[in-house]
Image: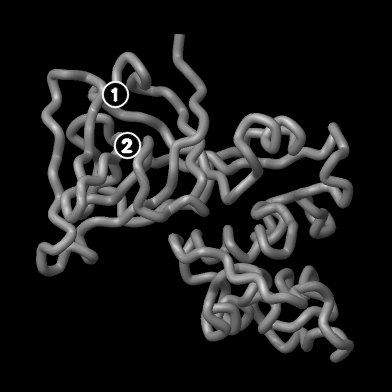
Amino acid sequence: MNSPKIRSEDSGIPKSRGRQSSSTENSVGAAILTALGDRSRKWLAQESGLPESTVGDAILRGPARTEVAIKIADALGVSLDALLGRGAPDSPLTPRRADNPRDAGAIITVPVHDVQVAAGAGRIADRLPPPIYHWAFSREWLEANLRGVGQLVMVEVSGSSQEPELSDGDLVAVDLDQSRLREGLYVVRLDDLLVIKHIQVDGRIVRLVSRNPLYDPVEIDLHEPGIDERFEVVGRAVWASKML
């Protein structure tokens, strides 16, 4: 989920190799091949930031994890619902993003997942489940206000540690492409908890800070053995829908 996208210098349509073989009994894999067209599986791996073996497994057996399906749909420029066959019967794999990025009517759909990121005690969540619905944004608005589109998902805030900045029940848009360790407001995984905290970096020490003064900072030593297994930056919080 946190690997940066790898884009080759010639990541457009490769030299003609003929249409991809449809030798798969998996409906999602067949949909991937349909959307892939004359492009290669290697191209899809590069565009999605996934290993070629993972792309091959997704075509043969279906995506093993939701994050794999999200990355493949994003790379192919189709909606996740269409890729997973959740749209109307016989509906085509329509592009999620318009060909003209400056078209004010171009719509980006952002998945909303039934996962809470704790602003307090926290809720156990290993990975994102399938989205429960989508929010629609204009591409123009996203590029003007969020400095680009990124790989956005929306999750719910649980708890009060970020009040008054964020409250229990607020929806937060998280850019999964921004997963490097930097200072700012981020969703992070700490053991089996997803939390939303302000990151402060002081050498080898990372502090997870709350806006609410009733909550003490959590300190993480980056040199602690096994810390890479316990701590992970999921993505940067870039926008919030406030409850009134």
Between the C-alphas of marks 2 and 1, the distance is: 8 Å
Report which quarter residue 26 is drawn in: bottom right
Residue receiving disc 2 = 196
Task: Indicate the quadrant where residue 155 lies.
Answer: top left
**Where does the N terminus fall, quadrant-wise?**
bottom left
Q: Position of residue 16 (x, y in %)?
A: 89, 88
> Is residue 92 or residue 244 the one in the foreground?
244
| Left or right of 110 in this view: 65 | left
Q: Nearer the viewer, residue 67 or 231?
A: 231
N-term mark: 2 or 1: 1
Vertically, is 61 above or below 142?
below
Q: Residue at x 74, y 58 (%)?
A: 77
Amino acid type of the residue tagged 1 in the rendering: Gln
Residue 45 position, x and y percent, is 62, 77
Q: Which residue is at the front of the view, 113 or 206?
A: 206
Q: Amino acid at mark 2?
A: Ile
Q: Does residue 123 lie above or below 2 as drawn?
A: above
The residue at the point 28 percent across, 35 percent down is 118
Are circles 2 and 1 on residues that touch, CB within 8 Å?
Answer: yes
List the single residue furthest toward the top: 244
In what element is the residue under mark 1?
A: loop
Circle 1 residues within 10 Å: few <14, some 14–19, many ≥20: many
The residue that disc 1 covers is: 162
Q: How many C-alpha atoms fall within 10 Å of the one at disc 2: few (<14), some, or many (≥20)?
A: many
Depth order, front residue of 162/76: 162
State the residue at coordinates (46%, 32%).
172
Q: Which residue sits at x=85%, y=84%?
A: 19
Q: Residue 11, how many percent across, how many down?
A: 75, 74
Quadrant in which the C terminus is drawn: top left
